[in-house]
Amino acid sequence: MCILSNNAIQILEERYLLKSKDGCAIETPQALFKRVAKFVSSNEEKNSFYETQFYKLLSSLKFLPNSPTLMNAGCKNGQLSACFVLPVKDNLESIFTTLKNTVLIHQSGGGTGFNFSKLRPKDDLVTSTNGTSSGPIGFMKIYDAATEQIKQGGKRRGANMGILNVDHPDIIDFIRSKSSKKTLENFNISVGITDAFMNAVIHNLDWQLVNPRTKKVDRTVSAKAIWELIIKEAWLSGDPGLIFLDTINISNPTPRAGTISCTNPCGEVPLLDYESCNLGSINLSKILKFHNDIYIIDWKTLSKTIHLSIRFLDNIISVNHYLIPEIKAITIENRKIGLGVMGWAELLILLEIPYASEDAIQLAKKLMSFIKKESYKASENLSIERGAFTNWKDSLHYSHQKLRNATCNSIAPTGTISVIANTSYSIEPLFALAYNRVGILGGKTQTEINAIFLQKMKAINLWSEEVESEVIKTGSIQHIASISKSIKSIFQTSLDIPWYYHLKHQKAFQNHTDNAVSKTINLPETATIQEVSDIYMTAWNLSLKGITIYRYGSKDHQVLQKCSLN
Ligand code: CDP
């Protein structure tokens, strides 16, 4: 079993280890990994063999599944998935049934995405009461209030994605809906963008807003004016992001089962109504080996880790507890899973490759294409052993390959599991070399210096009191005159890295990810409105499935803060 960091132990004790009625932990981290390995291997014929394999996989921190699996496997509440999309139809029955299901999902640790575009606009006619409608934003506020009270069983904040398509009559209010920092705090919001809209923006054309109830044009606006409003609001508050519906649907693996109009909360899994998905991430900082005094990627270990992780995620679909029959039905038909990565920035540091470099982009492509290829091989092997997913004959995969799973890969944010694995988040660069981490549910604030940075600086004899105090003060080494340019380039942090390199990494990983990539384009406070426009436009041009930016300091509460702010 790998030694856990203090942060990992603290998070596990606060939120993951089983507790007695009086709140004391009644299992050790080792017992947690045993509990998960045992439950996830319970559908295997050779279950004790796989229990041992899964235990080794988890306890070595080479792979971790999404939080609900760690929290709930083998427990009374055996809901193991992180990602759900639920339908919202234009009637109160549907709106409040989905709200009830949302609450149940949040209570079990899952997150929910909704596309509200089917709802009639605010002040539209309601025949049954002869009154007027509240509109999508009014109902989103109700969902938000319910989320606030549930807080995922007291363990973490509930997460929601709210989408409104760009041709909905309430789109302007939606774009502005998070202007005031206190509204919709439990929602990420994204505008559902079509290629037709982007062409209208580029050619400065009119754009029609259509009432979803009557299907009639409500009014005509300037596409460019909508674009400019989106950009201004995103610059101000980070919301809204964009999701590119046409791009997503080109790679929808099961078009006959429906069109995709929504993603899970952080954007890494486009899903059909009622679909759920299990995520897991490989810790890239653990797949290196030391050879002739330098680190190299251990492709053999990586391949073994991928095959076992895909089997682990596929097992979850079989042993999962489904909260409602609709979710069970479509999840089992498509068996979507999302294997991704964490620790990408640390891998680059250990290999001494700057994040903002073409070498990093080339390696991202090589690595993710390997992960995709091996994931598909693993899913194919499972299809031979266990059968293909039910919709396979009707899927885009039918002419290429027999698969057990309609999708295999997603790049999740790994907001908590990377802390447990003691590595950098997802494919993000280091946020800072030292930072204060604010407790998610109001816990203690902790100052941390990145361990790999510290180890490297000591190894090359560059660690000194001067460096330490600068890093604690600013989170960066970019202004220390005595440090060479090449060392500085390896330790560039999120805000030092030009936005186009953030996008290039997203693109490199997206190219070999059948679901999507959750990535935040972190920008310094000084970033301009024009830059945000350029980023959003480039994201569409690069055929990304979605885009999110965050300008430093533009939200009241941010989980990671540079030390200098405190
Ligand atoms: O690291 P962890 O497994 O906890 O989660 P993540 O990779 O940060 O997020 C993966 C997915 O979990 C998100 O896209 C959401 O669907 C869900 N999630 C949630 O429901 N509530 C949260 N507070 C965070 C994530």
Image (tube, grey):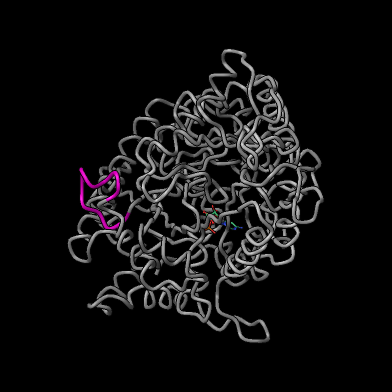
Q: Is residue 36 above or below residue 427?
A: below
Q: Is residue 562 above or below residue 523?
A: below
Point 43% across, 26% down: residue:
357
Relative to 141, 103 lies left or right: left
Relative to 89, 420 lies left or right: left
Q: In the current view of this chain or complex, which residue is farthest to the left?
A: 384
Q: Is residue 65 above or below residue 359?
A: below
Q: Quadrant of ligand 1?
A: bottom right
Q: In the current view of this chain or complex, which residue is farthest to the bottom?
A: 21
Relative to 513, 303 lies left or right: left
Query: Which quarter of the figure has residue 189?
Result: top right
Q: In the current view of this chain or complex, which residue is farthest to the top?
A: 203
**Of the pair 565 and 459, the residue shown nearer to us:** 565
**Of the pair 531 and 426, the residue shown nearer to us:** 531
Q: Position of residue 44 (x, y in %)?
A: 27, 75
On the rendered image, what quadrant is the N terminus found in?
bottom left
Point 33% across, 43% down: residue:
295
Residue 442 in view, yes or no: no
Point 63% across, 55% down: residue:
159
Q: Position of residue 365 (x, y in %)?
A: 34, 34
Point 43% across, 71% down: residue:
320
Q: Is residue 403 magenta?
A: yes
**Of the pair 117 and 191, the residue shown nearer to us:** 117
Q: Main secondary structure of the magenta part?
A: loop
Q: Position of residue 220 (x, y in %)?
A: 69, 23
Q: How many marks?
A: 0
Residue 378 in view, yes or no: yes
Q: Is residue 397 magenta?
A: yes
Magenta region, residue range: 394-405
Q: Position of residue 174 (x, y in %)?
A: 71, 39
